[in-house]
Image: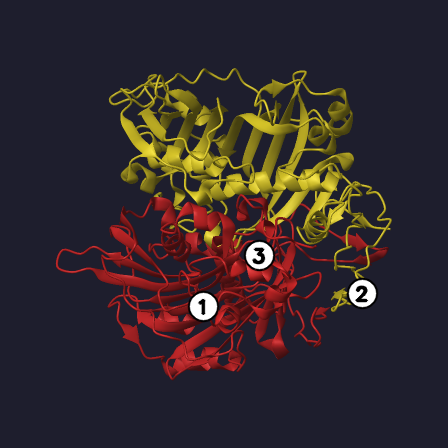
Chain colours: A red, B yellow
Amino acid sequence: MASFSSLASFTIRCSSIREHHHDPHKQNPSSIKINGTSSSLSTKNGAVGIKVAPEAENGHVKTQQIRQNIPTTKQSVDPFRQGLIIEGGVGYRQTVVIRSYEVGADKTATIESILNLLQETALNHVWMSGLLGDGFGATHGMMRNNLIWVVSRMQVEVDHYPIWGEVIEIDTWVGASGKNGMQRDWLVRSHATGLVFARATSTWVMMNQQTRRLSKMPEEVRAEISPWFIEKQAIQEELSEKIEKLDDKAKYVNSNLKPKRSDLDMNHHVNNVKYVRWMLETIPDQFFENHQLSSMILEYRRECGSSDIVQALCEPHEDGFLKDGDQQDHNNISLLNGFSMASGILEGNGLLKCFEEKPFRYTHLLQVNGEAKNEEIIRGRTSWKRKMSTMPFSS
Amino acid sequence: MASFSSLASFTIRCSSIREHHHDPHKQNPSSIKINGTSSSLSTKNGAVGIKVAPEAENGHVKTQQIRQNIPTTKQSVDPFRQGLIIEGGVGYRQTVVIRSYEVGADKTATIESILNLLQETALNHVWMSGLLGDGFGATHGMMRNNLIWVVSRMQVEVDHYPIWGEVIEIDTWVGASGKNGMQRDWLVRSHATGLVFARATSTWVMMNQQTRRLSKMPEEVRAEISPWFIEKQAIQEELSEKIEKLDDKAKYVNSNLKPKRSDLDMNHHVNNVKYVRWMLETIPDQFFENHQLSSMILEYRRECGSSDIVQALCEPHEDGFLKDGDQQDHNNISLLNGFSMASGILEGNGLLKCFEEKPFRYTHLLQVNGEAKNEEIIRGRTSWKRKMSTMPFSS
């Protein structure tokens, strides 16, 4: 019997761990003694009661499934990933320490690292649900229907970047998006103080793996995943403005970008983080050194394969926000876009300094240079604020 | 009082946890109940008894140190990183789950991910020791002397690549290397079976951060780190053959490689993993698809900065091993270089198949194209074996 009190203000009752998988090859039984109280933690293979999927028929697949430990029933706690089920049994929380290689030259986590951790916690959520088939987050029902998940929209807001060694908690949960889609949200907080560092939301639809066409959600898949849906939004919905399509007149253009072997994910597509890296590399070094990304919206248009040659376009924002010589409406607009209220207040007298900066927003486009025409991969919008470390911290 | 039984065959006595740092802003006191036994785990800030270094004088530095939790005294266990002190109090072990973004298209951990995890566990070892100053693994004594660590040699042997979701244990420890150097070794094992997946060893020397010249080890630094030294080698020492210097006649050459912002580490140097990526990208796709790296030796010659333009050279091995039409001495050489014995036996009848492949070894060079002459960054040697998944697994 295992229970795991939630770290948040609500208490979660977890289902009992019914089975411990015993591996005859175990060499190192472990026990942990903390603060004088001994707990027998069955940390070899079976800590979360893994049942290996019965469809594992041949030796190779079976070996892989044992090594991957993918459960076929819902789990409450994953001691290895430091994850647990929250939100009355449907959400997932994972505690993570920012690693040395996840930070940039300024010792704060890079946006790429944060996106990686969002992907990781999403997949671990599906792992915990007992619904994970083979593949990239697809459920058993999706696999029977040859369906994979594709992301159509992603929005991330970062108020504070965690630093090297900092302990953070990432919550994630899912909800319905229209009739055939799914929304996945995340909340990233300081483990020590509970302060919200970042929020994110994303929209997912299903695609037939063979035809590469979008698909309705089959009833058997709806039956699998809809019990996990809750109505809760990490980012307040607003009328999101259209991201205009850039053309060759864009101010910054990086052409002839080629995916490398190491940029491909398990689906042999260019991974999401590489897209963002290409987008951000169009922004001039000087701006990048003094600013950090505070929010990002990505609209996905088509897949990018390993043989595509990609072009990244980028344009400073032009709609009157912080244009040269235009100092009006700063209080409203900057707080809505370039800042969160909390970080604006935190930064004290640095706030005014920010208004001198330009530009704080960029529009982005990644496209494949085709023979007949260019095809859009992603449209994006990024908002930026001055880095804390370049501002007076306390005075 | 905390103790943590080692997962290996020896039992470790850990020093007591003397102090718990209480944060008045704590919102979420936590307790963990596992298998019916309750342990009060103070997991907010103070779980490992953090004392913030007294030299933190101004607000910014102090805030950063609280967030980073760098201890000033030796710790025995780090529940967040799942790390503990082993080897009679001087080694470090961390349990890690291979994450979704750490694997390549074949779902096995990439060599880059493994190198990242070696770096991470090394730094966490220093973190646990209470010796970590600000910076990239430098001790307090090193910081007082303006010294940083630089790696001069790295050798990695990988018998089995862990797969997505697999739980591994990484042990690391240090020893003396000559009079002024330090050796750091690693052992990577399957958490479930104890099977050794990988071994690594590295040699480090000290460099003056201002003059960029190598330095003798000051007595105060020796006093700090030598109590941690043990004599134990992850890789049996052998007479390592010289890695010859390649020139422009090398078979594969990638020129004009430019470090990107995201390739720089905290020291504003190109990070180690980027070097390896550049090296491996010179190897043709077709070979890469069917083979995996089984061992790698890197000899570091000089630093590479953000403005250097790099050239990567690569040459298939030419010393009689698996050259076209030359089939002699395979049993000796391939088992020593391309294979480990264990994996060779595991792969059964696939073993013979490997001998048909060519070439299994490459020599590498990364250099900066200078005006007067080219300057070496790294010489390297990589050995390869056929991928398990492309071989008959059981028959």
Residue tagged by mark 1?
A: A155
| Quarter of the view holding residue B349 | top left
Residue B106's x, y, as percent?
39, 50
Secondary structure under the numbered disc 3 in the rendered image: loop
Secondary structure under the numbered disc 1 in the rendered image: strand
The residue type indicated by label 3 comes to Tyr
The residue type indicated by label 1 comes to Gln
- Label 3 CA crowd tier, 10 Å (few <14, some 14–19, many 20+): many
The residue type indicated by label 2 comes to Ser
Q: State left or right for residue A176 relative to residue A51.
A: left
The image shows residue B13, relative to residue A12, as above or below, that is above
Secondary structure under the numbered disc 2 in the rendered image: strand
Residue tagged by mark 2?
A: B38
Q: CA distance from mark 2 to mark 3?
A: 34 Å
Q: Exactly how many numbered labels are in the figure? A: 3
What chain does badge 1 belong to?
Answer: A
- Label 2 CA crowd tier, 10 Å (few <14, some 14–19, many 20+): some
